[in-house]
Structure formats: structure tokens, C-alpha cells
Amino acid sequence: MYSYKNKKPLDYYNELEKIEIDIYNQLYFDEKSVSNIDELNIKNILSRNVETFEDYDYNLPQNIFLLNNYKGKIIVGRKIRSILRIEDKINAINCSMITAPMLLGFLYKRNYKNRKIRIDYYPFTNEEKKHIFNDIKTKRNIDIYYPYKYRDFYTNREETSPKEGWSFNPEKKEYLGYGEIHLRSFTIDFFKSLNEQFKIIYDPACSTGEFLNEFKKNFKTTYTIGHDLSREMINYAKDYVDEAKCCDAINSPIKNHSVDVMFLRFLNSEVVNTYNAYKIFKVLINKVKKHGLIVCFGHTPVLIRKEMFIKYNLKPIICNGYDKKRNAIFQYYVFEVM
């Protein structure tokens, strides 16, 4: 597989994306054109020569993911150029969806030193990728873990959103909407499957408010509360939620143990840094009632580890979602407050 060798940052669109197109062409396959296999021969896979992928943490390290404990093994994968980007529906190279061609193989070992990431793996054939993906896409307990974060070349710091929050413009609104169509659809289907009545729905970083609005259209008895750091976003969102307020999530005025469902869609890579994600998380989990739900996902990788949710006495319900239209899985955590 193609590895990054650049010693300095590459321009996102003019250089990085050109390489990502090459990686896409190398890894992509039409699943309909690939034969089905009846059984996975793990012993045969582990007898193959190890292949290597290398990157630096100032390129696209957040595209590397692990699927934990599949038949006792760890699967390593790497996102390729998003179909949403190809269709010009988002302005980012990648999105939250994972498809069969993105599975690389069983992890042999990984190393991260001097900002260089090295992944060694036993490679899958396309037939094996299809077989494994068709298996895992039905298992909502498979945890998707992104071990590496993008860091600025010069400062070595994680990228975050502006201190005053994102500004609002129509183009950004459209990209945000397209980037979460599959997330909204899965959310509606999942909550319908619960067949329960939830009253107070809270999103401490509601952005345009359209996510909560879509939720309320399907669950009309809910009361939606949307907060956001950006005053521009709140000025737009106020027409889409029952209650809107511009405030910092860590200073949320919501009373403890008063919310039935809380959507966390911002404790993610390139939105906040890991330190602040955990700091905010520890404050916000107290807002939810006992047996209420905390739902965590986003356009980019979630920074809070599943183990940390469990440490704070949250019971995992599911760890991923599935979109039938795109035949893709994605990070989607739902926890019950115990």
C-alpha cells in the first residue's frame, strides 16, 4: 500500500488529495464484482508476508482505524476517499463511513515514533474483505477505534475548532448536512427500535440545530434543547430547536440529572483536543438522568474511548451504526446511565 514519505506538510487539496486519489484507486473495489467465500481461513491469512503502511501525524493519521476483537484478532483499516467527496457533497477528503475496501488485514504490530506511524499487517484479499465486512456490519458491538490524531507540523498540537466556534455560512451548512445524512437516518431508526418515550433531548453543541429538528419531526413529543459556542450558529438554530442558547458546553446551565437523551457530536478529533474532550465529558455526563441515554458520534473520530465511558458507570448499548444505502459502518456509541 502507498505510504507517505513527505518530511513537511502537504497542501490538503493540491497535494494530499492527489495522493488520496491514488490510494483510493489502489484499494477500491466494487463488491458486486467480487466473489463470495463461505469461510475465512485465518491460519492462511496469518501465514502471509506482512505488508506495511506508513504515515506521519501531520498528514491524515486519523484515517487509520482498528476493529477490536474480531475472532480474537484486531483488524486494521485505513479510510479511503469518501463517496461523498467524490459526489462533491462534502469539502473534506474523508467522512465517518467505513466500507469493505478500507479493511487492510489483521494487525501484526504498530509503532509511533518521532511523529512517524508504522502499521504492519497480514493483508486480506478483496474476497476476504467482503466476507469480513458482511459479517461485522451486522454486529453493533464491534468497537471502532482511531488510535492516531492529526497534529500540526509546527506546534505538534491537535487541531481544534476556533475558540469562538464555527461561523455560519450556507455552503458550510450544506456540507454539514450531507456529511451526517447517514447519521441522522440511523439515529431515527435506532430510537424507533427502542419503542420508548424520551422527553428532554439535549445537544450541547447543536450547530445549525437541524439534527435536533430532524429528531423532533420523528418524535413529536420531545422537547429539544440546543446550545452552541458559536453565536452565529445559535442565531440560525433558534428556529429549529425548542430552546436555544449560546454557551460553552463545560459551563452548561442545564441542571444535573435532568436530561433523558444527550447527543455528544463534538467530542471529536479536529473539533476539541483530547484533554478538553475528557474534561467536558466528565461535566456533561452528569446532566443525564439515571437510565437516560448518552449518544456519541460525529463527522470525525470520537476522542473518548469506550473504556472511559464504562469507567464512569455507563452501560454500552451499541458501538457502531450501519447505513444500508452506502453499505457502510461508522462510530456510533450509545450508553445507558446506570
Image (tube, rainbow, N blue to C red):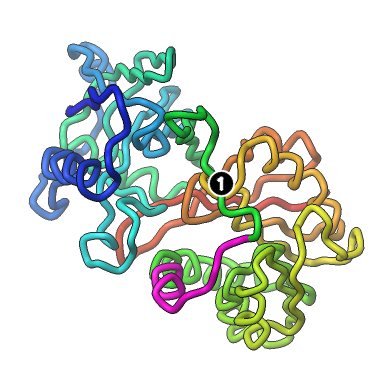
Secondary structure beneath disc 1? loop
Q: Is residue 261 magenta?
A: no
- Name which residue lies at 52% across and 71% down: 189
Residues drawn in magenta: 165-176
Residue beneath label 1, please? 160
Q: Nearer the viewer, residue 50 or 53?
A: 53
The reply, left or right, for residue 34 in relation to residue 289 is left
Which residue is painted at 35% across and 25% down in the image? 56
Asked if residue 166 is among those painted magenta in the image, a careful observer would answer yes
Residue located 30% across and 49% down the image: 99
Q: Position of residue 335 (x, y in %)?
A: 69, 51
Q: Amino acid at mark 1?
A: Thr
**Circle 1: is it few (<14), some (14-19), or many (20+) Cα within 10 Å?**
some
Residue drawn at (55%, 68%) of the image: 167
Quadrant location, the N terminus: top left
Q: How many marks?
A: 1
Q: Position of residue 272 (x, y in %)?
A: 61, 46
Q: Nearer the viewer, residue 134 or 201?
A: 201
Q: Is residue 113 left or right of residue 215?
A: left
In the rendered structure, the answer to whether residue 308 lies left or right of residue 327 reads: right
Residue 15 vs residue 213, the one in the foreground: 15
Q: Position of residue 326 (x, y in %)?
A: 30, 62
169 above or below 82? below
Q: Nearer the viewer, residue 152 or 4?
A: 152
**Of all residues shown, which one is farthest toward the front?**
154
